Image: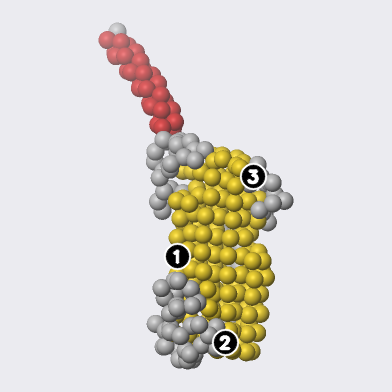
Amino acid sequence: MKKKKLLLVSIAALFASTIILSLWLMWLKDSFNSISVNSIDVDLSEEVTLDFEEAFVKINEWENEYIEISYDNIMGKRKDFIVTNDNNVLTLNTELEFSGFKHLSINVPKNMSINIRADTIDADSGTFQSIKCNKGTFRTCSFEDDFLSEGNYIEIRESDLSGDSTLHNQTIHLRECDVDHLLLDSENTNGANIEVREVAGDSVTLKGEGAEPTLLIRDSSFDVFIVTPEISKGKIAILNNNIKTVENNSSIEIQRKSNFIQ
């Protein structure tokens, strides 16, 4: 009888523990459901502006015809956020915390023309008309005619820059890209640092009144490279290139030494 009573008590305790554990797991799941999502319809016949000035964002194209924006509040409660759409200008109206792990993930329709302003941008695909950011990394992207980039740092790899493109950044890394007419604008950059590697296209121009840029062009092939006359200081080196015409209108001597720019 005593053993039977102990068995019943054990079963009851186990049952109670199972219920408590289930309730705790449900609470835990709800507490750490950290991802919030917004879906936004836009007019795809017009350019779309993503005005997320202080945000860290990651961008990818997808097959749907609307924009999806998600935010993962890592290891914390889900934090809902508001994005307003005013004639294809999207603005973040909620204060969020951003870091290397906490960012906005943005899925955009294929070939949608994007203007974006953010602190940090990481894009593995997308079609861009203009960019303004502190740091931007772009791979396998497309950049439209009259494209303009402004900010501190930009890296573009394995991408197409169609028509006239202007990069006005403190640090520029351009690699394995196709360009038509590229303008490297170092004006007011306080010594731009530019590397162009494995780039093919029609023309590349370096300009910048009062600037002292450091430019390395390596393993590239284009019809003409132009340096405008207002550049009087800085370093320029071209190595292992197939450049048909070099028009150096500045007072800087273009170097061809492999150790010239460290």
Provide the residue designation for mark 3: 87
Amino acid type, mark 1: Asn
Provide the residue designation for mark 1: 152
Label 1 SS: strand
The residue positioned 55% from the left and 89% from the top of the image is 248
- Residue 136 in the image, given as x and y percentages of width and height: 49, 61
Q: Distance of mark 3 from mark 1, alpha carbons?
A: 29 Å
Front disc: 3 or 1: 3
Q: Distance of mark 2 from mark 3, alpha carbons?
A: 46 Å
Q: How crowded is mark 2: few (under 14 residues within 10 Å), some or many (20 or more)?
A: some
- In the rendered image, the residue lying farthest to the right is 45
Amino acid type, mark 2: Asn
Q: Which mark is residue 132?
A: none
| Label 2 with label 3: CB-CB less than 8 Å | no
Q: Distance of mark 2 from mark 1, alpha carbons?
A: 27 Å
Q: Can residue 242 be seen in this view?
A: no
- Residue 201 in the image, given as x and y percentages of width and height: 65, 78
Q: Who comes first in sequence, dot 3 or dot 1? A: 3
The residue positioned 49% from the left and 54% from the top of the image is 118
The N terminus lies in which quarter of the figure? Answer: top left
Amino acid type, mark 3: Asn
- Residue 237 in the image, given as x and y percentages of width and height: 48, 86
| Label 3 with label 1: CB-CB less than 8 Å | no
So how many labels did they put on this image?
Answer: 3
Q: In this view, does 81 lie to the left or right of 75?
A: right
The residue positioned 41% from the left and 73% from the top of the image is 190
Q: Residues within 10 Å of mark 3 (few under 14, many from 20)?
A: few
Provide the residue designation for mark 2: 241
